[in-house]
Image (cartoon, rainbow, N blue to C red):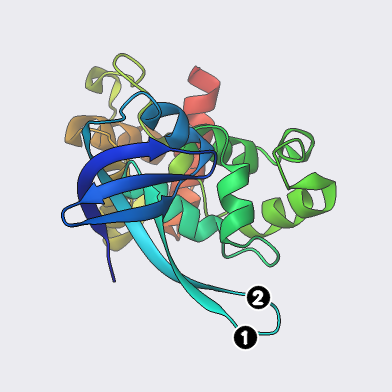
Amino acid sequence: MISLIRGVVRAVNEEELILAIDPCEITVLIPETARRQLQSKVGEHVVLHTMFYIEGNQMGSKMTPRLVGFLSTVDREFFDVFCSVDGVGVRKALRAMVRPTRELARTIQDQDVKTLATYPGIGEAMAERIVAKLRRKVGIYALIVGGPGQEKAAEHATNGQAENAEPDVIRDTFAALISVGHTENQARAAIDRVLSGKKKYRTVADMIDAIYVQRKDED
């Protein structure tokens, strides 16, 4: 699998870019969020985190290899989760990703079908299907660090009760928070805050949901 490529941007089109990797030029499909950031980088070197898939028509008579590119591994992971919904293929998912991953994940996490249905190619029925399938799977992406100053400082940490969650749940939640941009202190503080109550967390998804709700209340 081709998971990362480096090259010079030759052109940025509506749904794809041309990347020069001597001695070749490669066409890479990109989401709208990436297109907006890359359109000013023609002639510059960029790094894209990619996934490879085979595109075919309904009759299966023509199969075409495609590369899809993202600006971060987190965006690529979210895209893979997004495509797991029945009826959401690669092309539909790319068109729908008109907002940052964090924002799209929050829309799904909040079960905001009305807003989600306005995204290109989605519609109300598909939005309901996406929310039903992914609401419990996208919480960590809703916690992506959005920029400097948007995370609460570590001094808000409390002494969480470790007995409220199994060690592997705490460990995996910590790793998930680190993966979306939190510092180790911020991750520990977030986990400590949700462990300070009486609720018990059996899964990482349960703990991530609680952290998201707490962050939303603080915002």
Q: What residue appears at the point 65 percent right and 37 percent down from the top-left corner?
A: 110
- Give me the disc on residue 57: 2
Say if 6 sits above or below 194 in the image. Answer: below
Q: What residue appears at the point 83 percent right and 46 percent down from the top-left corner?
A: 124
Q: For this rendering, which residue is in front, 100 or 43?
A: 43
Q: CA distance from mark 1 to mark 2?
A: 7 Å
Whether residue 28 is visible: yes
Compared across the picture, whether 160 is left or right of 79 comes to left
Mark 2 lies on a secondary structure that is: loop
* Position of the N terminus by quadrant: bottom left
- In the rendered structure, are the residues bearing label 1 and label 2 in contact, judged by CB atoms less than 8 Å apart? yes
Quarter assignment of residue 109: top right
Q: For this rendering, which residue is in front, 1 or 208?
A: 1
Q: How many marks?
A: 2
Say if 174 sits above or below 43 in the image. Answer: below
Say if 52 sits above or below 163 in the image. Answer: below
Compared across the picture, whether 91 is left or right of 161 comes to right
Kind of residue at badge 1: Ser
Local packing at callout 2 (Cα closer than 10 Å; few below 14, some 14-19, many 20+) is few
Across and down, in percent, residue 196 comes to 38, 35
Q: What residue appears at the point 54 percent right and 22 percent down from the top-left corner?
A: 217
Kind of residue at badge 2: Asn
Whether residue 159 is visible: no
Across and down, in percent, residue 120 comes to 70, 41
Q: Which residue is mark 1?
A: 61
**Residue at the extreme top of the image, as rendered:** 149
Q: What residue appears at the point 68 percent right and 54 percent down from the top-left corner?
A: 130
